[in-house]
Amino acid sequence: MLSFVARRLAVAIPTLLILVVLSFVLMYSAPGGPFNSERPLPPEVLANIEAKYGLDQPFWKQIVNYVVGVVTQFDFGPSFQYKDRTVNDVIAQGFPVTLTYGFWSFVVAVTVGVSLGVAAAIKQNTWLDYLAVGISIGAQVLPNFVMAPILLLVFTLWLGWLPGGGWEGGQWNYLIMPVIALSTSYMASIARITRSSMLEVLNTNFIRTAQAKGLPMRRVIWRHAMKPTILPVLSYLGPAFVGMITGSVIIDVFFSTGGIGQFFVNSAFNRDYSVIMGITILVGTLTILFNLVVDILYAWIDPKIRY
Amino acid sequence: MTLRTKLLASTAALLIAGTGAVFADAHATHPETGEPLASDQTFVYRDLDESPSIDPGLAEDSAGGDILRDLFEGLYNQDPAGNLAPGVALSHTVSDDNLVYTFTLRNDAKWSNGDTVTAGDFEYAWKRAASPELASPYSWFIEIMALENASEVISGDVMPADLGVTAIDDTTLEVRLTQPLPYFPLMLTHFTTFPVHQATVDEFGSDWTKPGNMVSNGAYMLTEHVPQEKLVRARNEMYWDNENTILEEVTSLVISDENVALTRYLAGELDRTHVPAGQFPRLSEEFPDQAVSVPEACSYYYMFNLRDAASEDVQDPNVRKALSLAIDRDIIVENVLAGGQKAAYTFTHWATAGFETPDIPMATMTQEDRNAMAAELMAEAGYGADNPLEIDLVYNTSESHKSVAVAVSQMWKQTLGVETVLANQEWQTFLEARSNGDYEVARGGWCADYNEASTFLDLMQSESGYNDSKYVNSEVDALLEEAKTSDNAQANYDRVEEFIAQDTPIIPIYHYASVYMYAENLEGWPFENFQQQWYSKDLFKIAE
């Protein structure tokens, strides 16, 4: 197992490097640049800015300088758009926000999703099944950019129970709506995967054996059916978790949370090269990390899997 | 609620309980208007986006300007009507050749840490803004102020020390220009000219704009800043006119979605927000006291690509004029936009200070006459039903640009049989295409840097870096050059507008208006101020 982890981490480094180079090339090949505006800058002004941010250097040198800065000093450079801040500042401020609402969304999505899926599978073709499937399909087709304004309308404008946005350090009343809006569609997917996986497991021989030897249903489910059921869910959860904690531009836009999702999208529009790179590397690293975590969990849950 | 307002509120409660009177303290009524004041003097408003910077030298957007006018004070302020009002400077004198300005500064202006604001702080700030070291995107503002050596300092040919600004002593600032600019004092209300506290910059470097570090000289000081979420500023006790400041705390919230912002405004979380596109008629009916449309210092236009390499179709001035005539601007402002915008036949915004809109023949014609004339011009140019003109129109991705483009293409189609191919491009791609001349007709928008017609018309100069049409007319160049030193520039501006109407390098379509919702108890808003330069120190909330 240890050598497996070591191997995976060794592969992660070239993977990240390829990611950096590819993003760099793609970014620079997009038309426009970070300092274009309706009012083009006079050439002498532009020259100063390009010199300040190293954009006057040859392309290969920019990549090398960037990678060296990141590796040796963990320095992701200054933001081109937000001139008072560095990329590290942007991430340090936005990522904890996203991590918080992403984590709680994950908890909600998994708890509700798995419960719904299991309940639907056990009571297949009863009203409970139809209800659970109905809820999950409804939640799936209601995208969060529809959900968010509806939540705002109901809880902020009509009922006046919750603040319409902001973060305020992550107080619970500022968390509720973002978490509901973000977790819903994940919850629906988890419920559907759990349901079909559980149905498949319930039809296998070892479950029939367990029932035949007279074990109570609850014990069959928890002791025997749950582990194999959760495997396909787990492979979905890895990327889903990364997706949630690296934020959603929709959540950030509708609830003004100040999370990293909006910075990511804006940086692409603004051609804020250094912020694009910083967040790309962050998301890339987390994706690689959590895929590894999922693989380790696999081996832990399923004794058949050995690395 | 700050401690101060808490105290005020509790004092008020006690007094009301004890005597039945509503007087809380000296601030219970407005010193000038006598209106009873609300106990809660906090102002919360919406910003569309996080400002790129709140360093006066580096700031570049108008929302950042709103924040900076609270945090800092320049030589002059604008009064509610947009006229000059004393700021740190009390007055100035000008040399006979109009090239040397000498400002007399007040001696009671203080930084938020108690230091005195001196002429040297302005000298430092201006030299800093122009220096290649800071590399400010707004260093061009120092250039258009025509300060001696401005371009040379920016391009690094001479040291910032040689810029045309010198502190003679603590309260005297001398400024030397390379050419007379009649509107120079008005430019001094712009944030790029605000003073900067050198000791703070030296101590904290680029972190000096963070709360806790920032030392500022405006009516408010920075207390909290969470990028993409909010910026809070509180009363600066050191401000020389603190006695007359009423609002205790001002918060700008970044809310990207205008409909969300409106919902939060209606829920009482905001005191000011933008009216989403198309909703002004409904909101002004439902909330007549809150929905307000005021002129905004920008012009919306379509530009033709007049480069030699560009499409032949639009090189004929008659074709361009026909296309301009066939646009029914009234339909666009009344039915498509419906937010108080005004139909434009001149490039210069109608509300620009000292500008009398000249009589452009097209402006007084009926639309039927315009259409008839347009059809005639097109026929002369050789286009007709059997040989329709085909045109590419490109705009940057946005619902409202799209609706204008669709309406215009329909008008062209119906009146002239022109086939228009509409294309939208993402912002950066669009800007690049436009500046490289990779278009036939493109959307443009231009906002005033200062309140004088040349801020618009200078775009028509052959050599202007902003002349994306590449319109070249030596007579226009001469007229604009002469206007800079003329006592009566209006005649020149009239002629330039006539050239624009005749040659039609651009089609002015409408003059912007900004539409906002303002809380009913918010008073003192400078609706008359053309550039919408508002100062929180002039605002207050009345008791409901």
Image (spheres, coloured by chain):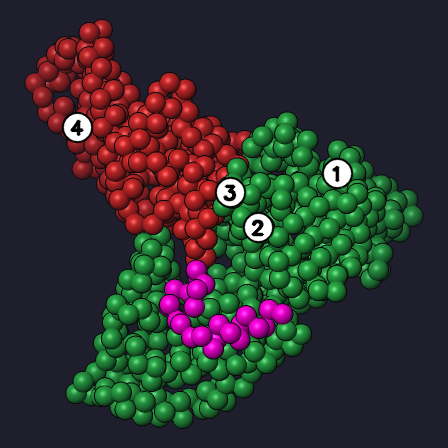
Position of B531 relative to A80 (above/below): below
Camera-near label (2 vs 4) is: 2
Position of B511 relative to B267 (above/below): below
Q: Which mark is residue B111?
A: 1
Where is mark 2, residue-wise?
B150
Q: State if disc 1 and disc 2 touch (CB < 8 Å).
A: no
- Whole-percent x and y of residue B379? 26, 90
Task: Give the farthest residue toward the top.
Answer: A2
The residue lying at 48 percent from left, 55 percent from top is B258
Where is mark 3, residue-wise?
B156
Three-letter code for the amino acid on which mark 1 is drawn: Trp
Whether residue A248 appears in magenta in the rendering, the answer is: no
Local SS, label 3: loop
Quadrant of the rendered image containing residue A11: top left
- Whole-percent x and y of residue B420? 26, 74
- Whole-percent x and y of residue B421? 25, 70
Local SS, label 1: loop
**Residues under labels 3 and 4: Cα distance?**
69 Å
Residue A150 visible? The answer is no
Indicate the quadrant containing the C terminus of chain A: top left, top right, bottom left or bottom right.
top left
Asked if both marks, 2 and 3, belong to the same chain, the answer given is yes
Q: State the extent of the magenta-drawn residues as a range.
A: B462-485
Q: State if disc 3 and disc 1 touch (CB < 8 Å).
A: no
Where is mark 4, residue-wise?
A197
**Residues under labels 1 and 4: Cα distance?**
68 Å
